[in-house]
Image (spheres, grey):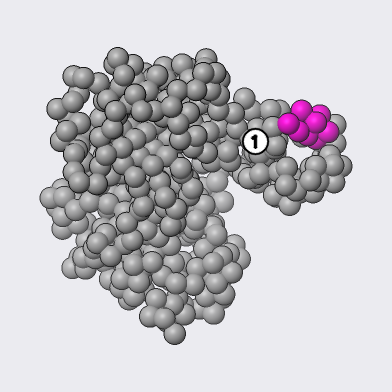
Amino acid sequence: MNTTDFSLLPLSAEMLSNLNEIGYTQMTPVQAQTLPLILDGKDVIAQAKTGSGKTAAFGIGLLHKLQVKKFRVQSLILCPTRELADQVAKELRVLARFAHNIKILTLCGGAAFGPQLGSLRHGAHIIVGTPGRILKHLDKKTLSLEDLDTLVFDEADRMLDMGFIEEIDKVLEYTPKERQTLLFSATYTDEITAISNRVQKDAISVKTVSTEVANKITERFYEAQDGNKLETLVNILSSYTPENVIVFTNTKLEAKEIAEQLQKRKIDALAIHGDLEQYERNDVLVQFANKSCPVLIATDVAARGLDIKELAMVVNYDIPHGEETYTHRIGRTGRAGKEGLAMTLYNTYEIQNALEYKNESRLFEDSSTLKKVNGFEMRPFFVTLVIEGGKKDKVRAGDLLGALTGDAGLSGSSIGKIDIYERQSYVAIERSLIDEAHQKLSKGKIKGKKFSVWILQ
């Protein structure tokens, strides 16, 4: 038996069965090193990069000791962004399938306060959220942490970067002194060590970054021809034809402008940045994740927590602010054994900044070598159909699949990813069949009910 088998841990037969069912048989380095400590009730500070399996590490730990019959908040996970909170909650729900009635609730800013109040009145076992919104509920006494026994800081370095330290300190005032505290961070800075010393007791330090398999990423740097970064970006896309790509910018305004310029060139692109409403962010993220949009233009803050498992390429439209940001950005490609591409653009006046990144593995190439394809376009294989019904309406993925392959007559291969939220569902449909699917689903019923259906474009 392998020493990284989950079956070696003192977990219930039900949890082990669920882990096996969802494909969790071997522990990743961070799971193998932290889980025995977490299950033993120790405070842990762990350095692990994005995609290392850290969510399952703390998730399995807190679910293992959860008392389902005790309908009180027993675990709180603090995240820097709404996207990461949603991603963590989603993974926890999959991990929690071994038991009935485990209630996991997300509380994040940017979403309406009223519905969150309603959900809190029904109670929850696990809360996942951003510091600001958690604090607001605590101050209004709509959330109680008196029964909390596990507190998790996920991507703690990013929370500090985003200036959440005051909110974190105030949230801590509402938590019991006797608790287990787990802190996960991609980097170990003096600030991280300081916060660990304040919020944890005898924390055991785990660093797995060196033992994790490095992503296979080819890194190329191009000076923009004639200072025209947009033209160089289009030439990169036409030369490498990636299935999907995230283009990082340093400002919100630039993200919006690049997306608009690419759309004019018939390259399907969407921007994600801090000015979007929550529903707009959901629409953008769903379309990119389900392959209804091949190009996402993003700022660093907006992209934090995005979980795209197969990303062909990352482009730094601007030189990142430091090696750490650069590493975070390009680490999103080349995962799960796949080879990734990371491109960085710079202008003449940025040459000095670009050269600071030069090393033996990074290729500085002439942008004139890129292939220019006249009339180059990027169109997605899928388009997203939105159904105005979700979890609150008891709509399940199987119901939508049944309606589309049954009455609507689509083949299963024409239907892509299905995402179900509280009040809406999103289905990726083959582009050539989107109008037909929309028409038939609009006229038909799902679970015997009529729902509004529209095309997201």
Q: Residues within 10 Å of mark 1 (few under 14, many from 20)?
A: many
Q: Residue at x 71, y 28 (%)?
A: 454
Magenta run includes residue 275? no
| Residue 355 vertical placement versus 251 (above, below) | below
Q: Residue at x 39, y 42 (%)?
A: 341
- Is residue 382 something that shows in the picture? yes
| Residue 404 vertical placement versus 344 (above, below) | below
The amino acid type, in three-letter code, at marker 1 is: Phe
Residue 303 lies, in percent from the top left, at 39, 37
Residue pushed farthest front?
369
Residue 22 lies, in percent from the top left, at 56, 65
Residue range highlighted in magenta: 432-441
Residue 255 lies, in percent from the top left, at 39, 23
Q: Nearer the viewer, residue 65 or 153?
A: 153
**From the viewer's perspective, is 166 left or right of 100?**
left
Residue 157 lies, in percent from the top left, at 25, 47
**From the viewer's perspective, is 240 left or right of 161?**
right
Residue 197 occupies quadrant = bottom left
Q: Residue at x 35, y 39 (%)?
A: 342
| Residue 183 vertical placement versus 268 (above, below) | below
Q: Quadrant of the N terminus?
A: bottom left
Name the element at disc 1. Answer: strand
Give the main secondary structure of the magenta stretch. helix
Residue 359 occupies quadrant = top left
- Report the number of numbered marks: 1
Circle 1 is placed at which residue position? Answer: 382
Residue 320 occupies quadrant = top left
**From the viewer's perspective, is 362 left or right of 82?**
left
